[in-house]
Image (spheres, rainbow, N blue to C red):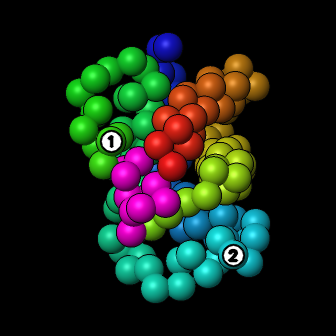
Amino acid sequence: MNTEPIQASYGRCLRDRNFITGFYQRLQGKDPEVEQMFAHTHWPQQQKALRRGISAALTFAGGSNIVQGVMDQMAEVHSRRGRAPVPPDYYTYWMDSLMESVREHDPKLTPKLEAGWRDALEVTCRFFIERY
């Protein structure tokens, strides 16, 4: 999968400081249990982790093995044995929240590019769910 256009879209989104904050507001609004998951979150650290995590997810979806260790680590953290378990059903909330944020912050987003985003994110979501 060619993720270069998606990476460029992500770069456009990150130009606005509210991109990550807005994503978390949307995500927490999806379900009260999701909000509880973030009750003791150190937000500056979490926001930095998400920025890196999305970059790794897009690189991974592009077929690069360079981020395999990072992906394995993130999957472990979010597994049922990890320090921040994410039940498989919650990945729909994550993807929907991220795509809502991308639609708001990327003025060049097209339906084709949005479909590419969803395809790329699905690769990561499946990877995490398989390791839950």
Q: Nearer the viewer, residue 34 or 79?
A: 79
User: In the figure, 116 relative to 83: above or below?
Assistant: above
Residue at 56 percent of width and 43 percent of height: 129
User: In the figure, 45 relative to 112: above or below?
Assistant: below
Q: Which mark is residue 33?
A: 2
State which quadrant residue 50 falls in: bottom left
Q: Position of residue 6 (x, y in %)?
A: 52, 28
- Report whether residue 51 is seen: no
Q: Is residue 24 left or right of residue 76?
A: right
User: In the figure, 24 relative to 33: above or below?
Assistant: above
* Residue type for callout 1: Asp
- Report whether residue 65 is seen: yes
Q: Which residues are magenta?
A: 74-83
Q: Secondary structure at mark 1?
A: helix
Mark 2 vs mark 1, CA separation in Å: 25 Å
Q: Position of residue 90 (x, y in %)?
A: 67, 56
Q: Main secondary structure of the magenta part?
A: loop
Other residues around mark 1 within 10 Å, as few (<14) / some (14–19) / many (≥20): few
- The residue where tag 1 is placed is 72
Other residues around mark 2 within 10 Å, as few (<14) / some (14–19) / many (≥20): few
Asked whether residue 81 is drawn in magenta, I would say: yes
Q: Nearer the viewer, residue 72 or 42?
A: 72
